[in-house]
Image (tube, coloured by chain):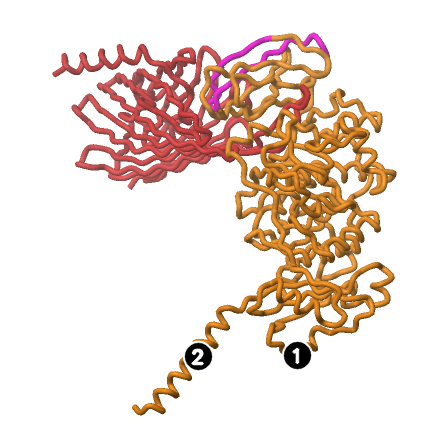
Amino acid sequence: MNIKSIKFWLITLMALVSCVSSTVMAAEYELLVYKSPVSKLNLNKLTLSDEYRIINTKNLFPNKSRLSLAKANITQTELLLVESDQSLEALMASIERLDGVSHVEPNYPLELYADYSDPDSYKQLNLIKSNALKLWALEANRQVVVAIIDTGIDTSHPDLADALYVNTNESLDGSDNDANGYTDDINGYTWLNWVSGVDHADVYDDHGHGTHLAGIIAARDNNDGVTGINPDALIMPLKIFNSAGKAKQAEAALAVRYAVDQGADIINCSWGYAYISTVLDEALSYAADNGVIVLAAVGNASRSWGYFPAAHDDVIGIGSIDENGDLTEYSNYGSALDYVIEGDIYSTLPLNKEGYGYLRGTSQSTAVMSGLMSRLMAHSTAVTASNINGLLRSAAPFGTDKQLSLGYGEVSIDALLAEYNIDASEEIYIFSDDTQNGEINSLLNAPNPVQGNSTTVYFNAQESGMQATLSLFSMNGVLLSESSFSTEEGVNEQSLDLSDLNNGLYLYAITVEGSSAAYTGKCMILR
Amino acid sequence: MFNRLLLYIIVILGFTSQLIASQASLEDSVLVESYAKGYAITADKNNLEGAEKNPASVAFESKKAFVFNANQSYDASIKQAFLGVGTTVFNRAKLSLTIPIQFVDEINEVALVNGAAIKMGEFSMLTIQPKVTITLPIFDFLDFGASATGLFDNAYNETAEGHGFDFGFRVHFDKISFGYALQQFAAEKLWSTGRKESIEPNANAGLKVSMLKNMDLLADVSKSKFQDSIYNLGSTLQVTSKLSISAGFRDVTNTQQFRFGSSLNLNSWRVHYAYGRHNVLSDSHKVGVTFEY
């Protein structure tokens, strides 16, 4: 090998190293490029630059003219997938120098605001403690559509399958029948990595967060699993988070606009980020301008800094309190916080994740408030986006004096019901078991499962003065204890002592003297 | 030898008189043939079902045996099954594996809201208690048995795992038999809630008297700490070589659960049916099949 040959191979090797190193250094960025109203810049036609290489671009409003966008106060926006070995700041500055570009932002990420909670937290049953289920007393006169922008939902879940919003103008045929820009969007839509073309009508939840929220809001009253706060609501699942819980704001903005255009009444945003992009900011304003209520979780970072979208002027921010009414250790607070409610809740999960479970966070609190507001709107058409805040504030402890740590406070369900002349102390909330009729009906014990040493057996008696016996049996039918009493007409309560018994299932029965009928129930001890 | 045996019996009886018990095993709810006899089976020979009360009472004529029961108790939401296989080892001992299963659904999940009870939903409970039993003839008139049981529960997203041991013997002569069993000895269960439970033992003692040509009379008593003594009575009549009928009373002094049933012999197969009537809870129907080969 001569000197020339060595030189040739050396230069070739250096060139290769240089090429490889430049490839290694290059990174991909998603940038939102906002153009001036008169801009005719077409990013697709940009030539290859030394500073960056455009991989893909997508116009967020492809079907709207510049004039119509300007009239609607919508900024022309393109999402740009670009590769560059520059720093992000330098890259954004490079693109901002282009004619017609007003400014450039990163496509900010979003974070979900929920964690798995203590496995023993079933003992808390906070949804009940918050009294939110009392809202069942408000008759639903219409079906309110709640858009959940999240991880999708398990549409096959027995508690949710009947709760899905249906786009009646669309059919499953591979076409965009309603010409809204989305194909086969019968129940909702999915935007994942939209700039790369990952968007479709399959809203399956491969994470679990969205299904949990859907159950809190609208799980059906079907004697199966759980029941949501508004079991008559319709859920519009709009999926922007992938299975790892990652999402970005351009996709969120598209989902918000979709929800508004498809007729959602409420948008639930149980996520956020410290910064907000212009495109999401404008989408939230669009929702408000169209009378759609947007609720957002304030975040689980225990900070006073307002996270978006909760900190947006047109969004109601929701935080979490514990069973004592104190702000939880994880809930954010500050000016973005409007209302608080408990957020450690048992609800639906995808069937491949056990079907039900506990999650906690401001995400769950937000879903409780979405359920609450949807029930109010379902009951009265007079409740609208423009006046619901006033209604809630009138039922909140700090309605006229917003607090830094608790916002307007926890909305009192009793006070809300009083607005509709419903006395919360009435017995309308006792579960009625239609399968048992006779002298005794609506028999059940509470709490069940039992964590303590006793439970209370509740039942309705048709008349007073009946001599009755409450008996407790093992599952083999062996008598463990019995007590006699005289009934009162209406609701009766009898305490059942379980102090000497191990965990497990037991049977109890009420018999009435002179009658052969026995009214039975099952009591589970689970300490 | 007899004196030593007597001493053992006295020691065991004396020990168990201090013992206490609570319901942990599925007992007769999973059984059919033994259920129809009022569960008064401590002193009887009981095919594979005997493992559920006295491990010394497991008996079958052929080398191997199989049993499957499918039951429903009190209402349709309480379902039980019983699977069992047994084989003869060392030409005289019986080794068996039995698996009682109970599934109960439609259990209300209920919470209190300002003093009012609200149904949140429903949940179910699954109980499985696999048991390995060895039954060993010590003398012509004495059988000894021992079991090891796994205890598994799943309810309301919580689980429990545990174990227990049963010991028993059966003394049998021409017309009379006596049986004694100590169930759930050293039994404990650990729940996923963190609770560890000691399950108190349950002592059974029973008598069987053969009367007339084809009729057996059965009686036994069970005692545990938190329960009054439970007295059971039963009888079996071999009507023909193909057909037997049984009847009994479970818990004679309290719930007086009347039972009856019949078994049909079809060569190696036996088909069983049992009915039970509880004075408070509703009726139960149970069917089963055994196969010996």
Q: Are marks 1 and 2 in contact (CB under 8 Å)?
A: no
Q: Disc number at residue A16?
A: 2
Question: Considering the numbered disc 2 on the image, is that residue within a helix, a strand or a loop?
Answer: helix
A521, A13: nearer the viewer: A13
On the image, which quarter does residue B45 sit in? top left
Among the chains pictured, the one given orange colouring is: A
- Decide: is B138 above or below A461: below
| Disc on res. A47 | 1
The image shows residue A81 at horizontal and vertical percentages of 63, 67
Please check the rendered image and state whether residue A470 is part of the magenta-colored stretch, yes or no.
Answer: yes
Q: Nearer the viewer, residue A76 or A382?
A: A76
Q: Secondary structure at mark 1?
A: loop
Q: Badge 1 sits on which subunit? A: A
Q: Earlier in the sequence, mark 1 or mark 2?
A: 2
A29 left or right of A527 in image: right
Do circles 1 and 2 both sit on a common chain?
Answer: yes
Q: Colour of chain B?
A: red
Q: Quadrant of residue B86?
A: top left
Chain letter for the residue marked with disc 2 in the picture: A
Q: Is residue B114 above or below residue A400?
A: above
What's under tag 2, amino acid-wise? Leu
What residue is at 43 percent from the left and 76 percent from the top? A17
Q: Nearer the viewer, residue A460 or A158?
A: A158
Q: Which residues are magenta?
A: A463-484
Q: CA distance from mark 1 to mark 2?
A: 25 Å
Position in image of residue A382 (x %, y %) = 87, 38
